[in-house]
Amino acid sequence: MSVAGPTGWVGRSIRRLEDPALIAGRGRFTADLPAAHRVRFVRSQHAAGRIANIATPPGVLVITAADLKDVKPIRPMLHKFDYVPIGQPVLATDRVRFVGEAIAAVVAADEAAAEDAADAVEVEIAPADAVIDAQAALADGAPRVHDEVAGNVIVKGLIETPEFAAARAGADRLVRVALRSGRQNATPLETRGGHAAYDPTSGRVTLTCATQTPHLTRTAIADLLGLPEAQLRVIAPDVGGGFGQKMSLPPEYVLLVWLARKLQSSVAWSEDRRENLIAAFHSRDQHITLEGGFDRDGKLVSLSADVTANIGAYSCFPTTCAVEPLMAMAELPGPYDVRGYRCSARGVLTHTCPMAPYRGVSRPVITCAIERLMDRAAASFGMEPSELRRRNLIDRFPYVSATGLTFDEASYIETMELAVKHIDLAQFRARQKQARNEVRYLGIGFCTFSERTGYGTPAFAARGMEITPGWETVEIVIDPSGFVEARIGSSPHGQGLRTTLAQIIADEIGVEPRLIRVVHGDTDRTPYGFGTFASRSLVIAGGASLLAARKVRVKLAKIAGHLLEASADDIVLEAGVAKVAGTDRALPIESLARAAYHQLHRFRDEIEPGIAESATYDPPGTFANACHVAIVEVDPETGRVTLEKFLAAEDAGRIINPMIVDGQIHGGIAQGIANALLEEIVYDATGNVLTTTLADFLPPTAREIPPIELHHLETMSEATITRAKGVGEGGAIGAPAAVLNAVNDAIAPFGAEINEMPATPRRIRAALRAAEKRP
Amino acid sequence: MLGEYAAEDGRILAGGQSLVPTMAFRLAKPAHLIDINGIAALEKLNVENGSLSIGACVRHAAFHRPALAGPLGALLTTVVHHIAHYPIRLRGTFCGSLAHADPASEWCLVAATVGADITAISTRGTRTIAAADFFAGIMTTALAEDELLARVNLPVLSRDTRFGFCEFSRRAGDYAIAMTLATLRLEGGAIVDPRVGVGGAEAFPRRIPEAEAALAGRAPNEAVLRAAADAAAHAIDPLEDIQADAAYRRDLVRAMTRRALARACA
Amino acid sequence: MSGKHDLVLSVNGRDYAVQVEPRRTLVDAIREDCGLTGTHIGCEHGVCGACTVLVDGAPVRSCLMFAVQAAGKAIRTVEGLATGDELSVLQRAFMEHHGLQCGFCTPGFLMLVTGVLEREPDIGDEELIDVLASNLCRCTGYQNIIKAVRAAAQELRTK
């Protein structure tokens, strides 16, 4: 891809190709499909216990584990870090391990009847002691969540660089922080759901479901049911947000396919919001203790960390539950140069809803931990937080980190300087001082961070993952009518990939994006691929699109060369036409396509028939980066935090569509703000979820999100062929730390500090009460 | 009709903005729902005999603009903007809120503070219940199963009545975790006839006599308002839930009361 | 409550004769009995607003209303916003300002704002944000929804 591109679609904020259907109510979501049968799950009301009896009402089809003897449990695998494989039965067999675990499935003609019937199923459970908190699960004599996992530690890693001990010993001062992140739910506005339909002619089942990973879903379900994959088609139609929650395999989907085969009919399940909040995957819930050793100039020389991740009752497929602690261990130093590093990380089983990746995965927490450390260190040195960061951010590239990660070219310092300039730090400090005189408490918080994106195969292999989802394939087909279709294994669900990939392809083959259809989310129509998660699709599927489009371009030029009696090198593709450069000889792409399929004789055996090119891309991975700044006001009497402004200066390399990039960052920041201030899944001591509605678990409204100001740099990294880096998670990664640092800056005059997310008004008041210092 | 169905778990449906979600959660499974929407007599909103009469089907949104001139109209318009969200306010009803008796209901606080008269009708007859006798606990009222809350009468406040309202909730439109409504008059530089109602903090909203006593006859200065706020914070028997423990609820009641009083005295 | 009621729902100017249980919510009737799936279900307890439709011009949560209560009233859903192929001003503004990502909350926001701007065309910017706080969006951080709605309100006022 040249900088301007032949027609220059890349870099433009063109309107999204996804929108016309969605805006008119013509989107097609899973729950929109009619089904012969509706399924309702009967779920455990106990966090731990043995199922003594299941009494089913007469005349109702109720499926229990006893019916599923041929169905294997979900058993994701990891080959390193002392991982203990555990199985999750599709329906609980003899034991239940969290409130909300599916025990039985009730089948009825409609939703209301299924709910009535499910209410009539009586499950008798002999309750057992439950452990809810990770620290409690680690205690001697704690109940085991799985018999085979002693001490409830399912995975543990330890890293210590040779430089660590001496660096720590030689540090001028040690600064510590202990941070806790509460438990969240990704809360896509569309809950999960599936629709499985049996085709009596072929014996195949089509599972339409709210997933980010249709191909992996097919692989997993076929494995669990013992089917050839060809017997199953998985469709991800329009999907109403995922944020990670829809990348892990729900046991419910397995059951739907099993039921469709058993009934030889269609069955559907729509998760209700309460089910989603208690039993769809949760995330975060980590404790991190951190100690940084600094030299007398404020340079970080040693960093040691202990990470405890509550992973819930089971391990999620495909990543396994190890993704949180292991990513924390590998990436905790973030964008700071430190050679002396030690980290121990554990994943701990508890009787709670299983944890799975959610936008940011671990990094919102580790970033918050190290950013709090940086602010505490800055305070200790009496330095502006930005100045301390300036002394520690990496600025030589490629940079190989203490944990062996290669950081490609980025702009850590530059984005911070940009943020400091636009937020006008000096002016803010003056305003803050003035406000304190008026008994108002303003605070500013910075967060500089890296966002590792486009993880390729080696990155996953390094973690010992059985499944290493590092590559994507794109097939571009031009049919005889000249219509361009790009079939991708990625599975976007709001990211606008149909538009951005079309922009990349358009620049190569000289066809307008609106005339390029990007096909995704159907295992029958797309090449195998891993889906959309981990800020990977634009980087990886975008790279594969570019490579495939280049091949198409070469072929079109060759065809045009033959037909126009010119050298292929002289063919220019633009505006849907192949031209001989410097002449008026031209043919529309339709004519090239028609000839490629129907008039092969015109090419003297020099081209293969048709136009269909495929390419795969597996990048080494790349680091996007940003500096986030939050300005808050804390009401010390109520603990309320009001966000006045949020600013992000970010660098995701080449921007394909600025409008879409901004949208991704806005959304991520909103979720990060929610992480920092609002959202928390709360369990009681016995393992009941207390936050079962959106009036208790609190996603922000338009009132809670302040105006967000964005600035961009574009470092053209050599690490990806499009020069683009991923941008899907950065907002969510950086915002919590910026907000928490701002809150702490605001309450500093009280001598109070809060290192817990969400920093709810209650917690802030408690911190202020405990501080008991009048400013 | 309610008389006939009350014994068989019949419920009145007005706006449905509280009852329907309860049914969706299968926490309420009424056998009969009696829809009172469309009964013209229940939509009446007018001033009669010195009080504002609010019929059972009057929606929250009826108070988006002052329903009457003077402080009561202004008070209701101030308060209504804190009730849930716009679409909810177009459906939900004033009287339904009282019958539902959520501890965090703004209208229940208004009724308790200004001293509403609540009219209940049944086949057995009509009776009027004073707000102070109406609320009995969390979502529990003095209404009998077969009684319909037909209307609520709020005394029209004298022109020199001042009011202040302050509410704390986590997000815009959320239930109040604590709120205070204060009304008072100033005569010769002293507070007269103070009423301090606190809602969202206890099982049901009520006036706090200790706070009122701290105000009556005193000058509306910072120290007096703080003393009244402290009195309210101490006097309550706080609800405890995931949003607020007892200590935090007292903090909030203190802050809301002081601010509501400051607004009233401003 | 049992038994089914025959009733006619008027949606986007077209009558649908449906048979529903009294407990059937309006959103279920619109989606399943009228087959109009543009209206979405996000929470079924009145918080998220994804199911917002207009009933006699008023934006309401259709999960908090029973179908039988909507008989004889004029219901409007997202499918009725465009005139033929011509999108409404608000729909166009959402596209131009990238006011949607996954699109799941979009019909609810469109109906909420359409109803409010019809009822209160001169609504101020701040009040508009209060109105937008009625519904939840998980993708956009609201920035571009606010932009789109302000632009549409402006365009409608000058029309």
Image: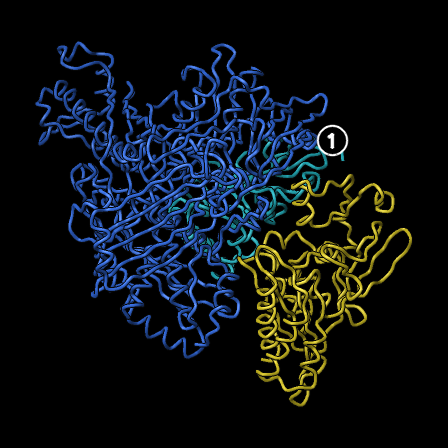
Q: Is residue A555 above or below residue B261?
A: above
Q: Is residue A416 above or below residue C112?
A: below
Question: In the shown orientation, is residue B50 left or right of residue A235?
Answer: right
**The hue in which chain C appears in the rendered picture of the protein:** cyan
Q: Amino acid at mark 1?
A: Lys
* Residue A171 visible at all: yes
Q: Where, by quadrant of the figure, is residue A271 drawn?
A: top right
In the rendering, at what x and y percent does residue A528 appear?
Answer: 33, 24
Question: In the shown orientation, is residue A3 left or right of residue B82?
Answer: left
In the rendering, at what x and y percent does residue B262 appear?
Answer: 58, 77
Which residue corresponds to the image point at 58% horizontal and 67% vertical from the top-left?
B252
Q: Is residue A382 above or below residue A137?
A: below
Q: Nearer the viewer, residue A328 or A664?
A: A328
Q: Tell me the residue that label 1 is attached to.
A: C4
Chain of the residue on which disc 1 is drawn: C
Q: Where, by quadrant of the figure, is residue C75 drawn?
A: top right
Which residue corresponds to the image point at 36% horizontal and 65% vertical from the top-left?
A444
Q: Which lettered chain is shown in yellow?
A: B
